[in-house]
Image (cartoon, rainbow, N blue to C red):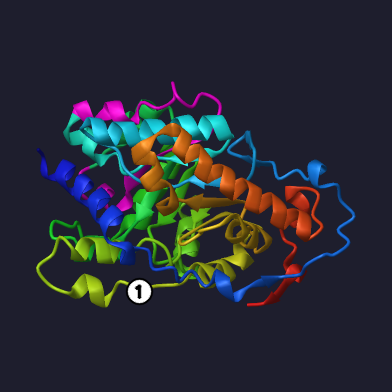
Amino acid sequence: MSSLQQRKEDHIRVVLEDTAVDRRQSGLEQIRLMHRALPELDYDAVDPRCTFLDYTLSFPFLISSMTGGQGDALGRINRHLAEAAEAMGVAMAVGSQRIMLAHPEAAESFRLRRYAPSVPLIANLGAVQLNEGITLDDIDRIVDTLEADALYLHLNPLQEVIQPEGDRNFAGLADKIAEVTDYLPIPVILKEVGCGLSPADIELGLQAGVRYFDVAGRGGTSWSRIEAHRSDDDLGITFQDWGLTTLEALQLARPYRERAHLIASGGLRSGVDLYKCVIMGSFMCGVAGPLLQAATESTEAVIQVIERFYREYRTAQFLTGAATFEQAYDNAQLILRA
């Protein structure tokens, strides 16, 4: 088994075994929403549909990046997620596709368009790999294999520092990101992996031609803690709660909504959390951790989790008097306390 493959399997194992990996500190619990006792709506007519990457989705739910690679187990996880995305009419992003460049046989776990023909699929590569020899031709292979509608370039400096075999040269990446945005005919999305994007990060991304940003705040899965399981010291534990919470990252990103599309992720654990993020200006919300166990089981198990999020989201929309997604978006007066 390759070291990359072993790493991916280690990650899945740690997430499933160490419950403290899910930090549950997104900050969204600090927000309460204005309840409407007289919403003047028929619940059955409440419409949470939204548009993302030119697709109409059932509600603003993105299956966030998890895994992929060699082996039947990882392939089954991605297939279950893709089939559930198609069934529920939601978007899906895959885990890092770097492994398929070194091990072509791993590409099979990323050939998902056959399972999800009518929803957005997002390819994924660590931005730091642009400093490690990844070429535009390699990016073409990544995008074409998934038949992707967008590309995540994920930013994970903390994880790379903690990771024993991490790539830590993040110098000059903004210029290389600009080369990718100029080259690709599909959008590039900058994404943190759980420490939040700062305004300075968003500014650099905008200058590089990026218009989509996944703020991915602290509060969900801690990759620092995950990598601590694979390290010989406690640095990953020291930094397991490093970074901006999801709430802080969203608050700091709000001024950029006229120039950027914001995606919220990081510790979103209910449809109410998703709805709070939409009210704060996110037009899409990413969820990963709550889906992983279900994805190891079956497509039906994943669908059940997404259906729960859908019911919770739609109920929150009804109880705040918003008939449509558009009426909820940018409705900050509904926030009572933050």
Q: Position of residue 95 (x, y in %)?
A: 34, 43
From what the image shows, is residue 165 above or below residue 199? above
Give, as a single range, the part of the protein colored magenta.
Answer: 104-133
Residue 75 occupies which quadrant of the picture?
A: top left
From what the image shows, is residue 186 above or below residue 125? above
From what the image shows, is residue 197 above or below residue 44? below
**Magenta span has 146?**
no
Query: What residue is drawn where x is 44% and y is 66%?
Result: 196
Residue 229 occupies which quadrant of the picture?
A: bottom left
Q: Amino acid at mark 1?
A: Asp
Determine whether the residue tagged by mark 1 lies in a helix, strand or loop. loop
Number of numbered discs on residues: 1
- Tag 1 residue: 241
Of residues 126 and 201, the one drawn nearer to the viewer in this rendering: 126
* Residue 327 in view in this figure: yes
Left or right: residue 12 versus residue 45 is left
